[in-house]
Amino acid sequence: MEIFNNIGKINSAVAVLKSRGLTVGFVPTMGALHKGHLSLLQRSKDENDISLCSIFVNPIQFNNKQDLEKYPRSLEEDCRKLEQADCDIVFAPTVDEMYPEEVKIKYDFGQLDKVMEGKHRPGHFNGMAVVVKKLFDICLPHRAYFGEKDFQQLMIVRELVKQKNIPVQVIGCGIIREDDGLAMSSRNRRLSPHERSIAPEIYKTLLWMKHQAGKISIDQLLQQARQKLTSHSEIKIEYVEITDEESLLTVDDWDSVRNIRALIALFLGEVRLIDNMRIK
C-alpha cells in the first residue's frame, strides 16, 4: 500500500495507472474508519483494478468549531486497517496541502442543500462539495463510493457530478449497522456506555415508521415518531422528516411520489447522530 500526502505526486501516480488501462475506485473518508468504510473499500475492490482511499478531516464542512475539534482522528490506526483490507493507495493530505488559499467557491444545488442537514448546518454542503470536487480532480477515479447513511450528501454529490460534468460514476452503498441496528459512524465512539445503550432507538423508530407507512397519515407518523424518540430525555431531536427520495422535499401524501425516505438527525448527549431508511 502506498501512502501519499502530496497532491502532485498522487495525481501523477494515478494518471500512470490509468494510462495502463487500469480502473480506479475511490473511497473518500474523514478517517476514524469502521466496518462501514471498509465495506465501501471492498465494493471498490470488487469492481476496480485499483482502490484508493482518502483520509482528510475537511475543516470547511464543519459549521461547529467544537465538532471539528472533537472529531476523532486516528491516522496510523486507519492506515493499518486499510493495509489489512488490501487498499492499494491512501491519500492523507494536510489542510495546508488541500487549501493553500482561502476557499471562495460557492455552489448552488437548488433545494437539495437547503433542507435538513443544509438547514441545520449552514455551509456544510458547500464545504463538502468543494472537497469532493477537489478530491475527484486529484484522484481521477472511474468510480466513487459513498454510504447511504449520509443520504443527502450522496444526492448532492450526484448533482455536483452532473453540474460539473465530472467523469466519475457515483455509487451509493447500503448502510452498515451494528448488531443492534445502530448505523455505524465514526461519532459512535464518542457515546458514553449509557448513551450507546439508547442509540439503537433511532433504528427502531425508523423500522416502526416503515411498518406504519401508508397505515396512518404522514403527520401522525411524524408526530408519533418524535414522541418515541423524545421519551428518552437524553435525546434532543434536530429533525425527523419524510421526503421524496429524489428531490428531498417533504411529502404529505403516501401516493404522491414513488420512493419515500425517512431521515432523522438528533443529539444524544453531545453527540450528533443521523440515520435514514426507505419506508415506501
Image (spheres, rainbow, N blue to C red):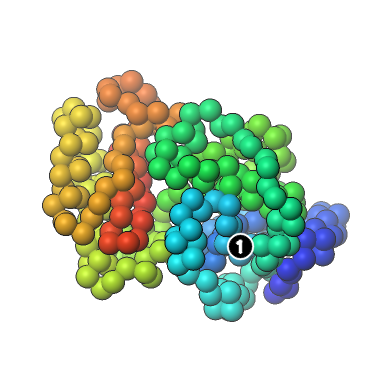
Q: Describe the element under mark 1 as helix, strand or loop.
A: loop
Q: Position of residue 261 (x, y in %)?
A: 35, 37
Q: Position of residue 210 (x, y in %)?
A: 25, 41
- The amino acid marked with disc number 1 is Phe
Q: Is residue 252 above or below residue 236?
A: above
Q: Is residue 73 above or below residue 164?
A: below
Tell me: 172 left or right of 101: left
In this view of the protein, which residue sits in the foreground, 233 or 144?
233
Tell me: 175 left or right of 138: left
- Determine the residue positioned at 58% across, 74% down: 75
- Determine the residue positioned at 77% across, 61% down: 7
Q: Position of residue 172 (x, y in %)?
A: 52, 47
Q: Position of residue 168 (x, y in %)?
A: 68, 44
Q: Number of numbered discs present?
A: 1
The residue identified by callout 1 is 56
Q: Quadrant of residue 214?
A: top left
Q: Quadrant of the C terminus?
A: top left
- Determine the residue positioned at 27% across, 67% down: 196
In this view of the protein, which residue sits in the foreground, 254 or 122?
122
The answer, for residue 264, to whether it is visible in the render is: yes
